[in-house]
Every structure is written in C-alpha cells, then in structure tokens.
Amino acid sequence: MLVNRGIMKKDDIIRLSIYIIKEYYKNNLTPFFEHISDDVLWIGPATRQQIQGKENLMQAYALEDHSLTFTMGDIKALCVSPHIHVKEVLLHYDIYTHYPNGNTDVHDQRLHYTWCDKKVQTADGPKYQPMIVSLHISNSWPYDNRDTIYPIHSESILASMHAHTEPEQHITVKSSDGYINRIAAAHILYIETIKHSAKLQIHTGNDVITVNETLSKFEKKYPDLFVRIHSGYLINPAHVTNIRRFAVTLSDGTQLPLPEKKYTRIKKLLLYENTEK
C-alpha cells in the first residue's frame, strides 16, 4: 500500500519544536513523548549521557522524581533541510533551573532536533508524519550517578541568583538570515527602519535582529506594545528614561530623534503609559 508523504515546512517544524520545549520546561512531557520516534537517540544534557529508544527514554523519565521548576529566556531558532524528508532544527536559549533550596542556576542551552518523516499507524491507516529521531542538548551538566535526566544532585549549583520571571508577552519574527526568533516584548528597546529598504532592525538589550518588514505593518501588528515617535522609529515605552524636545532617551542610553511637532503628543502619551503601569 502506498502512503503519500507530505513535505515538512520549515516554519511549521520550528514552531512545533519551540512548542514542545516550552511545554517540556513546564513539566508537561506529553507533546515531547508524542513526537519522538521509537528509535530516538537522546544525547545530554548530563556529561556522557546517551539513551537509545523511546521505551528506554520513557523508563528513564518514569524513574525521575524532582521538585525542579524552569524558566526559559528568549528563543532563537534555525532550520536546515539536508533532505526533503529531514529537518534539522537548532534552538538557542537560556534555561533557568530553580531548585527547592532557593538557588537558581542558568545555562546557555543549545538544543538540536533531527526530524524525519516516519510511517505511523493511525485510525485511518498508515501515514507519514514528522517524528524526532535524535535530540542533542549541548550544554554539559556535571554527571551524578543518582541522576536520571535532570541534575538534581549536582554539587556545583551556583550561588543563589535573583528569581527570574518569564515575561508574559512575546513576539515571533523571522529574521533575514532565516532564524525564527521568539522575543520577550519587555526585552525590546526600539525598532528602526533600514533606510531605502523594506527591512527593520529590532534592538534588544543584547542583540539586533533584522527582519523583512515595514515599520507601518509592524506597528499595526503590535499597537499595544510600541509607540511611533518618528517616521523611522518605534519605541518600547517601558524603556524610556527621559523625553525632551528633539530627543527620547532609552534605558541603555540610546537617544532617538523626536520631531518637535510630535513632542507634546508623545510626551502626554508616555506619561499616560507610565501612569497606567
């Protein structure tokens, strides 16, 4: 019996990969287990940790008993396709592990999925669907023989850090270099037009992301998050530290031009935003 094989779309696989890891770090493992192949290979995060096969991986998780909670930072994702039925997805993000003793450890984590079209049995008969055949977590935790998956017994937990709360609002954009970026709105300082192009630069506290978009379209997508102060700039009101004639100063010291004719209206708008918060 021939079974039609669909073509995995890069953006769909990236979004599914992000969804799975977000749920995973909410301690909801169901989406993860639903999308791993029977012959999956798991590598990491503990040093020398490798688990082969879905059944063995599920048994390892069944032995896991922990009180850890997690918070994810912004996510950057890239997908490459070495074959029409294979997708390699790389996610890059900070993961904060919150321990029962009040300590919080942070790792700069890279997660590499290999997705492959696999034939599965369904109520409507056999069909192909994308499944995870390998998963590699590249940051290396110290290994402890008492641990199964998470480093519960790690003796090298860092000194207690300030609690990290994930911002509630995020935006998702595809950058000009092919990455899909999930960015906390609170981390965005301002957005500017690249002159003589239909591109924008999104400025965060530690990154500049170029996207194929116009400022007007971006403003319409997120009218409640940003304020238009100039034909070439949107700003995040939460990062304004000073406003005066001809200039707005942001929390990182950046000064952006403010046309005199817009000064009064923008000043009132920003004062209103700050009062509301």
Image: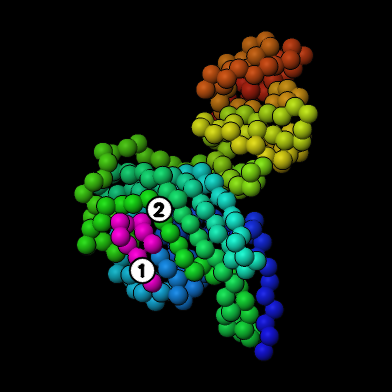
Query: What residue is at 40 percent from the left and 40 percent from the top?
Result: 164
Instruction: Identify the magenta region.
Output: 43-52
- Measure the C-alpha gap from mark 2 to mark 1: 15 Å
Q: Nearer the viewer, residue 260 or 94?
A: 94
Q: Is residue 13 above or below residue 35?
A: above
Q: Residues within 10 Å of mark 2 (few under 14, many from 20)?
A: some
Residue 35 x, y percent position in the rendering: 52, 69
The residue tagged 1 is: 51
Q: Amino acid at mark 2?
A: Ser
Query: Which quarter of the image is occupied by the C terminus?
Result: top right
Q: Residue at x 49, y 69 (%)?
A: 133
Residue pointed to by mark 2:
138
The residue sitting at 36% across, 59% down in the picture is 44
Kindly indicate the quadrant of the structure image that contains residue 200.
Answer: top right
In the rendered view, would you say 37 is above or below 254?
below
Left or right, 64 with respect to 188, comes to: left
Q: Nearer the viewer, residue 213 or 39?
A: 39
The furthest residue to the top: 245
